[in-house]
């Protein structure tokens, strides 16, 4: 199959009667916000199941997400577009103007550490619950990248290429999935590729969570260890240096994200080692929520009822065996 076969996604902004930069609903922002919302809901559900304080969990998410977004913009500006800071120092305050994924990760880690210091709380349980839900949120985040094409890769004739050079894209009225069988060259869309590669991780984490409790640190550690190599390889396919903002600068032949991958892997192995100090209970029944929490969550209530039925069944069987022995 010759030539790029993946359509170019073109979604227009929805105008709003508000001053800039709030004068439209942008597909990227909508998808990212959806990811944050869904990730927060799943994290709170998982926190309830592990018996964590939900008020503290909410507070922790606020710190991590808020400082994460600040870090995402500031580090993007410092490492990717320092010339914009030189022209306009106030660009650092324009949080909506540019985001870096690794800047967000670093900001989130700083947020967790600040929460630990200010609130004097142990944060590993909160971190792990957030990371158990993060891949699902990341799928939506990278979906946002795939619709604005802010991670263009190198030119390619492979069928895995996106039709970046389709002439129909110059038509202001064209939108949706822009595709033509005549295209012979395109680009890798690294945001789209990373979104697709994140789906198996999100599904795996969901199945592992339902299977049995894991030590605190399990999800955080494995997320770091598994994500870093994927990102390290993908960045070799990024558009060439100097090709606008998307052409990431190279330091020693590697992008800033590739250098950060080494730190992320090290952090992952450290957290996995730390998780051994927090053994998990054998079953979910051992960390079952209180009756009030069960009433608030039908899924948890149903599971608690099933566990109770199994325990009653085991007790009845034991009593019958005792009667048989006496007879």
Image: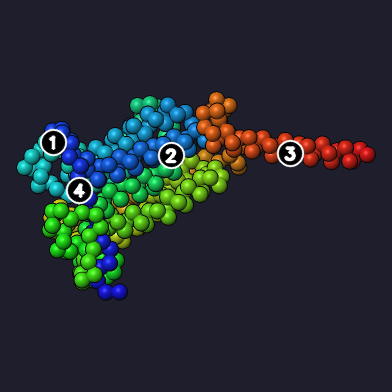
Q: CA distance from mark 1 to mark 3?
A: 64 Å
Q: Indicate which label's residue lies in the foreground, 3 or 4.
A: 4
Query: Is 166 rendered above or below residue 79?
Result: below
Q: Residue at x 15, y 33 (%)?
A: 17
CA distance separating discs 2 and 4 = 30 Å
In the rendered image, the residue lying farthest to the front is: 173
Q: Residues within 10 Å of mark 2 (few under 14, many from 20)?
A: some
Of pointers 2 and 4, the one earlier in the residue sequence: 4
Q: Secondary structure at mark 3?
A: helix
Q: Position of residue 82 (x, y in %)?
A: 13, 46
Q: In the rendered image, which quarter is residue 115 located in?
A: top left
Residue at numbered disc 3? 313
In this rendering, does residue 182 appear at all?
yes
Q: What label sits on residue 20 in the rendered view?
A: 1
Q: Disc 1 vs disc 4: Cβ atoms closer than 8 Å?
A: no
Disc 3 and disc 4: Cα gap in Å?
59 Å
The residue lying toward the viewer, choosing from 279 and 289, is: 289
The quadrant of the picture occupied by the N terminus is bottom left
The crowd level at tag 3 (other Cα within 10 Å; few <14, some 14-19, many 20+) is few
Whole-angstrom CA distance, mark 1 to mark 4, is 16 Å
Q: Secondary structure at mark 1?
A: loop
Residue at image x 25%, y 52%? 147
**Where in the figure is residue 108, as x and y percent of width and height?**
32, 39
User: What residue would you read off at disc 4?
Assistant: 12
Q: Image height check: is 27 above or below 112?
A: below
Which disc, if any, is residue 42?
A: 2
């Amino acid at each position: 199959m010759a030539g790029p076969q993946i359509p170019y996604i073109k979604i227009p902004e929805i105008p709003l009667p508000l001053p800039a930069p709030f004068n439209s609903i942008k597909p990227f922002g909508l998808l990212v916000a959806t990811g944050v919302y869904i990730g927060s809901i799943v994290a709170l559900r998982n926190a309830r199941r592990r018996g964590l304080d939900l008020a503290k969990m909410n507070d922790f998410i606020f710190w991590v997400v808020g400082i994460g977004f600040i870090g995402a913009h500031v580090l993007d500006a410092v490492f990717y577009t320092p010339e914009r800071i030189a022209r306009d120092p106030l660009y650092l305050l324009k949080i909506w103007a540019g985001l870096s994924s690794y800047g967000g990760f670093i900001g989130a880690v700083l947020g967790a550490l600040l929460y630990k210091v200010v609130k004097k709380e142990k944060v590993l349980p909160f971190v792990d619950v957030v990371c158990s839900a993060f891949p699902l949120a990341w799928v939506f985040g990278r979906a946002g990248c795939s619709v604005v094409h802010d991670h263009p890769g190198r030119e390619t004739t492979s069928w895995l290429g996106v039709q970046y050079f389709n002439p129909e894209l110059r038509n202001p009225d064209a939108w949706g999935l822009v595709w033509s069988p005549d295209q012979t060259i395109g680009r890798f869309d690294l945001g789209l590729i990373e979104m697709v590669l994140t789906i198996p991780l999100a599904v795996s984490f969901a199945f592992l969570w339902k299977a049995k409790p894991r030590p605190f640190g399990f999800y955080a550690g494995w997320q770091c260890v598994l994500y870093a190599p994927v990102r390290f390889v993908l960045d070799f396919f990024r558009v060439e240096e100097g090709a606008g903002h998307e052409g990431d600068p190279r330091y020693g032949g590697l992008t800033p994200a590739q250098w950060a991958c080494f730190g992320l892997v090290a952090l992952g192995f450290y957290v996995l080692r730390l998780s051994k100090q927090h053994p998990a209970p054998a079953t979910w029944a051992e960390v079952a929520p209180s009756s009030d929490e069960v009433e608030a969550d039908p899924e948890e209530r149903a599971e608690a009822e099933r566990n109770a039925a199994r325990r009653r069944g085991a007790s009845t069987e034991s009593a019958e065996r005792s009667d048989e022995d006496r007879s």
